[in-house]
Image (tube, rainbow, N blue to C red):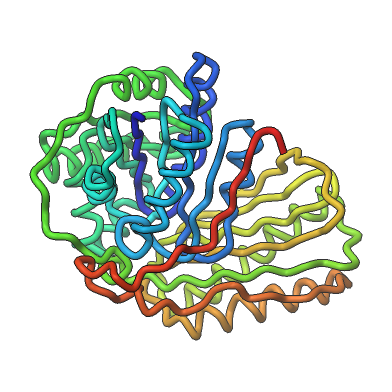
Amino acid sequence: MKFIIIGGFLGSGKTTTILKISRQISNAGKRTAIIVNEIGEIGLDGDILAASDIVTEELTSGCICCTLRISMQYTLQTLEEEFRPDIVIIEPTGIAFPGQIREEIETMGFSELSFSPVVTLVDPGRFGTEAKEIPRFIETQIREAEILCINKTDITATELILSTEKMLHEMNPEARILKFSAKHGDEQFEKLLTHLAVPGLKKPPEEMKNSIELSEVSAYSVFYILSSCALNPEKGVCFIEESLRTIQERVREINPEFVGHVKLSLKLPESTVKGSVTSSKELPQVEIIPDRKSEKAELRLLSAITKVPKNKLIEIIESVLGENLRKSEITFEKEVLEHESENDTEDHSKHGKEQICRLNIYRKDE
């Protein structure tokens, strides 16, 4: 198996990038699988990636570079036995260290193992704030990369892109730097595919780090079953935009410079409305995605943001979503799936207490 690891802080555009890469690799005749890692217990991106007819498996409730090592090994062994992929693309959670994931996989005993260069995506619109909010964490993510990708060039000022490029080069002068828009799949994005075809270089192992501790991120996820929902996709967009905007405003009162990711997904009978906001300053981004028919309407939220106490984050999210659901006259039942894991603050050298996490498997024949 050949592994492609594409990391980057929360909201840097990993899912969009991986979706386009996986389609091109699969269209070229390669058996391709994707592993998606979400920090919360609710998976959102796995549904979107699985719609591309690529075999997708989703690991939730932790980070695969530290607390979910056993879960990842079990998943990879299952893939190797049942699907025998040529290429496995890994989308780690936005607080993971991609280089550390490679080191872990190398110790798992797989035969004919190879790696593409480790990739880290950067959102230039937030890079300065990220480095200020969590400097050690961002520095480690950038230093571990062999390819640094400045994403979202279609919505970022040229001078900001150039200043980000300069800072990245100073932090990791050995890495190749690409600038592109993954959303539009421009010429520079095509170059990424070419570079991924080249074998990655093995870097000297470093001390294992706990990404959850270093990221200073609070995470919370929640799942609502909607038993009476008269929303159509257009009204769903308004609901998502208003909810994200209000959550953003209330979180900003606690941390005016927060970065991270708040993802909100509304599954309707014929489509899914998906939205996100990734910083205190960014406008919410919302899109309608055609989906497989679903009898149940669902609302899922996954959040992971910097320097906001978790109890405050929970309070904000539950009050905003509850208020907006009632205002829209939607009957709902809330189910919180997240739990506190004693492994979240565990030293990386101790894996004896790890457990298999909740695993969502998406097959293209389902």
User: Which residue appears at 82% of the width and 54% of the height?
Assistant: 235
User: Which residue appears at 88% of the width and 63% of the height?
Assistant: 229
Asked if residue 338 is positioned above or below residue 231 in the image, the reply reads below
Left-right relation of 76 to 107 = right
Q: Name the quadrant containing residue 112.
A: top left
Left-right relation of 352 to 17 = left
User: Which residue appears at 70% of the width and 59% of the height?
Assistant: 240
Front position in the image: 152 or 220: 220
Q: Name the quadrant containing residue 296.
A: bottom right
- Residue sitting farthest toward the left: 204
User: Which residue appears at 67% of the width and 66% of the height?
Assistant: 243
Front position in the image: 305 or 167: 305
- Residue sitting farthest toward the front: 81
Dividing the image into 4 quarters, which one contains the C terminus? top right
Q: Residue 260: x, y in percent?
A: 43, 61
Dividing the image into 4 quarters, which one contains the N terminus? top left
- Residue sitting farthest toward the top: 28
Q: Residue 96: x, y in percent?
A: 33, 55
Left-right relation of 167 to 320 = left
